[in-house]
Image: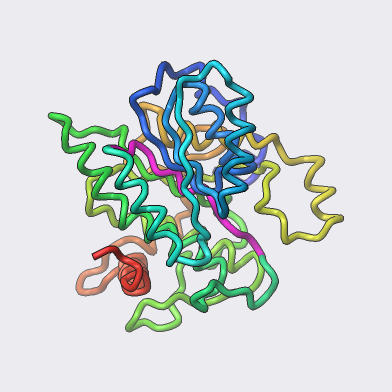
Amino acid sequence: MNTFDQIHAAAPSFTEKSLVDLSSKVYLITGATSGIGLSLATLLYSLHATIYIGARCLSRYESARTSITSAHPESKGELRPFVADLSSPSTLGPAIANVLATSYRLDVLFLNAGVMMPPRGSKTHDGYDLEMGVNCLASFLLVQQLSPLMSNVSAHFCHANPSIRVVWVSALLNNSTPDGGVQLLDESTGAPKQFKAMHNYMRERTDEHGIQSRNPHGVLHVVVNPGSVKSELHRYTSSPIRTMMGAILKNPKYGAYTELYAGLAPNVNDGDFVLPWGRKGEAPEHIVASMKTEEGKKTVSARFYEWCEEQVKPFMAS
């Protein structure tokens, strides 16, 4: 799938009108207080779902809650806070513990939050590159901690249940992506190389494609390019560029439809790469090749997965 076809996609065919009552379902959306995440939460709430709203602070959750409930006052759905700073993994522990204590199920985990091209040298509270920490390690930690709950939900069915999913929000992988996606700085540990500007962002978004390829819990993992839409992801770009982009970027609801398709459409399979505004595509060949096994050697994605495991160990609940 070329870049033009991904940017100029056909109208979404899988929307809220494709679904019925979701009152028995539970979803968690990171970065749900604005942009695509807020639009997706609003769509799901309109269908009476229970949604954990990922927010950096309680005030942002309250603002999102007001926006969502006022848009659909008739909904019988429920909104719950998931308050955590993804650049500080220590804050994820209490938020995850709250989910595990207050919900017996989690149907779809939408890893929607991200950061793109922050000021050079930006770090997480633990000293990681900010994009690596937020886009990869925080998401990896969430999946590690919440997959057992999701797997337990899936196990209650008498056959494989494809509705329990993790949706990894990636990007347009055709452009500015380093060859092979993940490039390792240290072959022995799997530590990834750092790049500059957009190349660094695209590397982290490609890293997610490698992470999801390891699926020990039997839950479907899907990667999406949500599309070119208006969002806070562009907050670090210059004002003139934001102005120009604003003229061509779509309403966030279009990106929400992409994620809705990835999370709830019936014809989605494990490992699919979903394109705007809800259709199947293929990752670039050089990324797919990096995940293929060679005799006697671990794949690049496997080594990176193991590196992520080591980095999040201090924050794993015992």
- Relative to 263, say whether 287 is above or below: below
Give 11 or 39, whichever is nearer the viewer: 39
Residue 129 image offset from top left, x and y in percent: 55, 74
Q: Which residue is drawn at 52% across and 22% down?
A: 46
Q: Which residue is drawn at 54% across and 76% down?
A: 194
Give 189 or 234, whichever is nearer the viewer: 234
Residue 150: quadrant of the picture: top left
Given the current orientation, which residue lies at the most extreme left position? 158
Residue 156 image offset from top left, x and y in percent: 16, 33
Check residue 110 for magenta coloring. yes
- Residue 153 visible from this viewpoint: yes
Give 166 or 97, whichever is nearer the viewer: 97
Q: Residue at x 49, y 76 (%)?
A: 126
Check residue 220 for magenta coloring. no
- Residue 6 visible from this viewpoint: no
Q: How is the image coloured?
A: rainbow
Q: What is the quadrant of the N terminus in the image? A: top right
Given the current orientation, which residue lies at the most extreme right position? 240
Q: Where does the magenta region start and end? A: 105-117
Instruction: Give the left or right position of residue 38, taking residue 84 as reference.
Output: right
Q: Which residue is drawn at 60% across and 43% down?
A: 33
Instruction: Give the left or right position of residue 20, taking residue 255 as reference.
Output: left
- Relative to 167, say whether 79 is above or below: above
Total labels drawn: 0
